[in-house]
Amino acid sequence: MSVIPLSPWDLALSASLVMMLALLSWQLRLGVGRQMLVAAARSLVQLILLGLVLRVLFDQTHPALVAGLTLVMLGVAGYEVMARQGRRFIGIWGYGVGTLSMFLSSFSITVLALTVIVGPTPWYQPQYLIPLLGMLLGNTMTGVAVALDNLTRGAHDKQGQIEGRLMLGDTCQQAIGDIRRDALRAGLIPIINSMTTAGIVSLPGMMTGQILAGSPPMEAANYQIMILFLIAAGTGLGSIAAVWLGSGRLFDERGRLRLDRLRHA
C-alpha cells in the first residue's frame, strides 16, 4: 500500500480551518487569535525545515549532523519548559533545570531503546533516532514543565507553612516533601491519561502514521506500545530529576527557603 501524497492545495484547505478558528476567536474576543495564527505559521515553517533537514540526514547518516539536530531539539525544549512556568528560577537555573532533566531522561532512554530494543544499524540511524527522541522530548517537556510549575508555585503559595516546619526542626526536604509529591503527581497525570485512553478514546500519533504509511496494524500497535512505555519512563524520570534539582535550588546551604531565586514570568 502506497502513501497518498498531499498537494499544497490540500494543506491550504486544512490551514483555512485554522484561519476560520482564529477569526472566530477574534469575534468572541478570546484574545488568542493572533497567537493561534503565529503558532500555525511557526509549525508550518518548522515542519518544512525539518523535512528538508531530515532528507539530508537520511541520505548521509552523518553522526555529527545527527548530534547537532538532537542538541537543537533539546535546546528548544529546554526553552519551552522555562517559558511555560509562572514562576521560574533566575539565571542559568531557569533554563538549566528543565534542560538537564530532559537530557538525563529522554536521551538515555532513547539510546537504550535504539541499542537494546529496536537495534538499527547504525544505532543513530536518523530514521529511528529523530522520531523517537522527538516524541520523548515533546511529552517529557510537558511533564517537566507542569511539575516544575507546580513546585515553584506551591513553594511560593505555602511559604509560611514551609518556614514553620523548618522552625519546628524539619529538614528542608521534609518541609517541602508534600509540595514535591503534588508536583510529581501533576507532571505524571498527562502521560497516565494518554496510556489509559490509548486505543479506546484516541489513536496515538505514531500508530496512525504507520498505518497511513502502509504498515501492518499489529506492527504499528507494537511500536506504539513501546513508545508509550518509553514516554512514561522518560516523563517520570525527567519530572523526578527536575523536581529534585528544583527543590534543592529553593534552599541555600544552611537550609533556608530562598524564594528570591524565583521571579514571576
Image (spheres, helix red, strand yellow):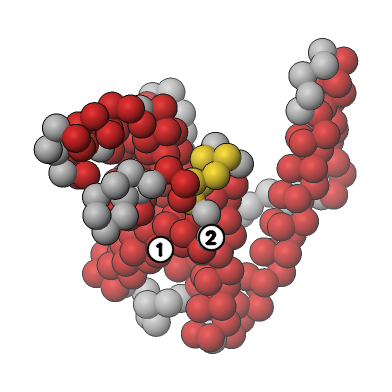
Query: Secondary structure beneath disc 1?
Result: helix
Dot 1 or dot 2: first in sequence order is 2
Residue 182 in sight = no
Mark 2 crowd level (few <14, some 14–19, many ≥20, 10 Å Cα): few
Check the image and name the residue furthest to the left: 169
Asked whether 264 or 23 is in front, the reply is 264
Label number found at residue 91: 2
Query: Secondary structure beneath disc 2?
Result: loop
x, y percentage for residue 97? 42, 57
Task: Please give left or right for residue 142 compared with residue 121 in the image.
Answer: right
Mark 1 crowd level (few <14, some 14–19, many ≥20, 10 Å Cα): some
Label number found at residue 36: none
Amino acid residing under circle 2: Gly
Q: Are marks 1 and 2 in contact (CB under 8 Å)?
A: no
Q: Residue at x 24, y 29 (%)?
A: 164
Residue 163 in sight = yes
Q: Residue at x 59, y 47 (%)?
A: 83
Asked whether 14 or 143 is in front, the reply is 143
Q: Residue at x 29, y 47 (%)?
A: 256
The residue under label 1 is 100
